[in-house]
Amino acid sequence: MAERPSAATDARRATVALLDKVLGEGRLMAECQTQVLERLSGEDRARAQRLTLEVLRNLERADKILAQHLRKAPPLHVRNALRLGTVELCAGGAAHGVVNDVVNLVARHRRHGALKGLVNAVLRKVASDGPTEWARLRVPRLPKWLRKPLVDAWGAEAMAAMEAVHLAGAPLDLTAKPGADLSALGGEALPSGSLRLHDAGQVSALPGFKAGDWWVQDAAAAMPAKLLNAQAGETVLDLCAAPGGKTLQMAAAGAEVTAVDVSEGRLERLRENLARTDLSATIVTGDALEITGQFDAVLLDAPCSATGTIRRHPDLPQAKDGAGFGELIELQAQMLAHAWSLVKPGGRLVYCTCSLLPDEGECQVEDALDMFPDMSVGTQASTLEWVEQGWITEEGGVRLRPDYWGDRGGMDGFYMAELRKAAD
Ligand SMILES: C[S@@+](CC[C@H](N)C(=O)[O-])C[C@H]1O[C@@H](n2cnc3c(N)ncnc32)[C@H](O)[C@@H]1O
């Protein structure tokens, strides 16, 4: 009878399969991990996700170490297996287990099985010299296509600080339902009100999850709704709402929220979140550009490059190359203009994106201010005591970067602006 592969092999095989998809096919993990991980146990799934993120964060370092032992690049699948082995060995993984497992998974491959000897020889060298060299390697840099515009926008020093935070990964931030007691969770209360957990483990096993006392939301992602400051009884339109962190915040404040998103799959998660937290909102599946009506307030969290979320999604800069960003910028401008037409006179709109590119943030708001004579920037940001002076931009928006609150674990990169409509 054939021997059942070890659990570690299952997780490592899935890790290499995910790396093949991200690095070979330009797919994001969110698009392909359900399919790749579906047959794995919960434990192996979590392990494969963790290993994949670790390899992607350390890709530059792994390639640097491997280049010393390879005369020419092997096929991508084998290279990804070597990258995984290298990252595990250099992070202190037991040499015997890691090398054997990675060699076995290459040996079983239909086309590349013959390269198992090479993999064995290379990983044995990595096991002996890699860990010492690893410590001397620089913090991995973003790929050039993204690094260049970000250095142009924020400078080399800020870029290096952001890359250090990207390497460290992200803690888990929670937003509490008003009145809920989160003391059983421990953690660190952030100035903006989010609760930060380092090493949180499985989210659904945390105290208060089933009771709906909180939801997962990065501290930066929780700030746009605080800037909008929805009041009980106000009509609020949440455009591009799923999976709904901001909808929940505004519904919890007592506003009558209409949540719109084009993705039925993502709206399903919004429905689950509303049910778990016992909050309510009207859900509309559709294109934000086709919504009609008049609202006291509108929150537009426009689709964007998501370049602010790299510490949680290190696959993004490796899978993408900036193609399609021009169309997104055009779509954001159209959505902002349409969203503005849905704001009642005297009402307000918060525009935000989880992007680090000024074209998707500051520039959009500058253009809108030029285009709409009845638009001005509001003053709510200056009343929030945790908004630091340096975060306020020239046009009056709020710029957040991953390196802000860096000693606490950073935050997602975001841009947001509160735009006020003149009363009739
Ligand atoms: C940044 S995410 C929104 C995150 C969400 N606001 C939250 O806080 O959980 C952007 C969303 O825009 C949605 N989207 C993209 N194009 C859209 C369109 N034309 N109309 C409505 N929603 C759209 C996507 O499905 C995605 O859920």
Image: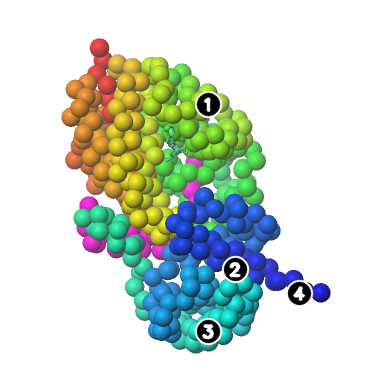
- Mark 1 vs 3, N-terminal side: 3
Local crowd size for mark 2, using a 10 Å CA cut-off: few (<14), some (14–19), many (≥20): many
Q: Which mark is residue 12?
A: 2
Q: Is residue 75 left or right of residue 13?
A: left
- Say what amino acid the circle numbered 2 marks: Arg
Q: Residue 171: say if magenta.
A: yes
Residue 252, horizontal then vertical, whole percent: 51, 29
Magenta stretch: give its range: 153-175
- Mark 1 vs 2, N-terminal side: 2
Q: Is residue 353 left or right of residue 389?
A: right
Q: Residue at x 56, y 54 (%)?
A: 33
- Say what amino acid the circle numbered 3 marks: Leu
- Say what amino acid the circle numbered 1 marks: Ile
Which residue is disc 1 drawn over? 283
Q: Residue at x 52, y 44 (%)?
A: 216
Q: Quadrant of ligand 1?
A: top left
Q: Which mark is residue 3?
A: 4
Q: Residue at x 56, y 85 (%)?
A: 117
C-alpha gap between disc 4 and disc 3: 24 Å
Which residue is disc 3 drawn over? 118
